[in-house]
Image: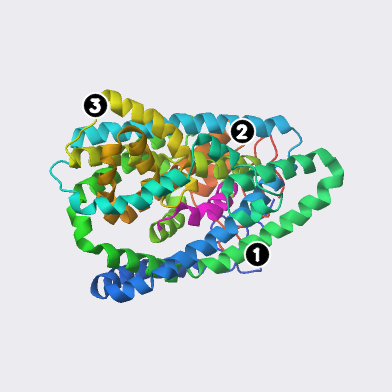
Amino acid sequence: MSTTTPNDTGGTPGNATPNTAPKRDRTHWLYLAVIVAVLAGILVGWLAPGFGKQVGELGTLFVNLIKMMISPVIFCTIVLGIGSVRAAAKVGKVGGMALGYFLIMSTVALAIGLVVGNLLHPGSGLDIAGHAKETAKYVKDAQGAGGTWDFLKDIVPTTLVSSLTAGKVLQTLFVALLVGFGIQAMGATGEPLLRGIGLVQKLVFRILTMILWLAPLGAFGAIANVVARTGLDAVKELALLMVAFYLTCAVFVFGVLGVLLRAAAGVSIFKLVRYLAREYLLIVATSSSESALPRLIAKMEHLGVERTTVGVVVPTGYSFNLDGTAIYLTMATLFVADAMHKPLSWTEQLGLLVFMIVASKGAAGVTGAGLATLAGGLQSHRPELLDGVGLIVGIDRFMSEARAVTNFSGNAVATVLIGTWTNTIEPARVRAVLDRQLPFDETTMVDDHPATAAPSLEKSPVPV
């Protein structure tokens, strides 16, 4: 047992000695810089819109750099997790329970969006004629996305290696499962492969840490571009929809998810949100929950959830557990219907609800996912409402931040819940981490000694 004090702020817990000063965590300067960059981006986009549009590519480049690292992170995490487990049925149990949970929570989120939309009617009295021409792009995206079978067929990659280069999360997940089970079946012969992939994982997280220092530039470019293109009037014009959507997402996270997390796992949603504060800031700055996916994997492992559970639940949740997108789809549909003075009947709303339950599962793989899926739903049920999608194009970027944060929160909570239900989490370590007794190592994002600083349960954690 290490003698490292709980309040060390740098280095991996268990590595420091009484005569060695812990490394200082300088990453807080990075996230302060992100806040400054966001404020600067708003000012530049407002006061110099021409320049704001030009620097928009900085945000795209940063998000692309993060996406570049997602497949390697998922591959290493899943292979190491499964390869370290002797019973293959355990992975199947985690995956099955996760998919069942995702289906239930997505349905709940869609229902909440319908209820709030029917209570507030935020689109009443608006004129959308001038925005109709902007809809065509999103209809085309929706048609290009294909149906449910196309989505399922796309899970199988062209080659074993192409899954790592195509940047598709579900393809990477599929191949990583095959490799993990293959190494597991090799027994002791596969241990050198596990050690090698463990070293690759450390390298991947080191590279990711370096990329994150570019976050201020990415945040500045993304915010400056969206403000320059939409102006502040777009936010004011549709303020009711935005406020209603943000409040609904907050109620879902702190109400529905918070109550479920407390009842099932005994964990405070407020402490979990505080623990993931830097990830939330990164998501708000980039309007993409994918930018925080690698860090969520690392932080859930540090929290005390077994690597196998994290490796299955988090990547799968990013494609199947889109709670924020579900709320957005139903509220935006009712908004468009009200704005065009063609409200939906309850039977039409229920039919659309069933469609959205399926359509939202593939939203993560579509460019402009929220708007494209919304257009696809309207096209299949009420095509005369398609012209109204253009109304919310101007503020979709602002709403995408709430969608991304809600999706991210749903996946973090799901990981803790599935870990609790499958007995693959250490409650004692969870309490220690959330109480800030075991700080996350921002310099490596890899926990080499997860069991040395907190009391372990009867079952030993997965070795890393």
Say which residue appears at 62% left-offset and 36% top-offset.
424
Q: Quadrant of residue 187?
A: top right
Q: Quadrant of residue 250?
A: top left
The label on residue 345 is 3
Q: Front-most of 359 and 318?
A: 359
Q: Is residue 219 magenta?
A: no
Q: Position of residue 205 (x, y in %)?
A: 62, 61
Q: Tell whether 310 sits left or right of 118.
A: right
Q: Which residues are magenta?
A: 287-301
Q: Front-most of 362 and 185?
A: 362
Query: What residue occupies the far left of the structure in this picture?
Result: 125
Image: 215 above or below 237:
below
Image: 296 above or below 441:
above
Say which residue appears at 54% left-offset and 55% top-offset.
295
The residue tagged 2 is 94
- Disc 1 secondary structure class: loop
The residue tagged 1 is 18
What scheme was used to colour the molecule?
A: rainbow
Q: Position of residue 86 (x, y in %)?
A: 76, 36
Say which residue appears at 34% left-offset and 56% top-offset.
397
Say few, some or many: other residues with alpha carbon within 10 Å of mark 2 (under 14 / 14 to 19 / 20 or more). many
Q: Earlier in the sequence, mark 3 or mark 2?
A: 2
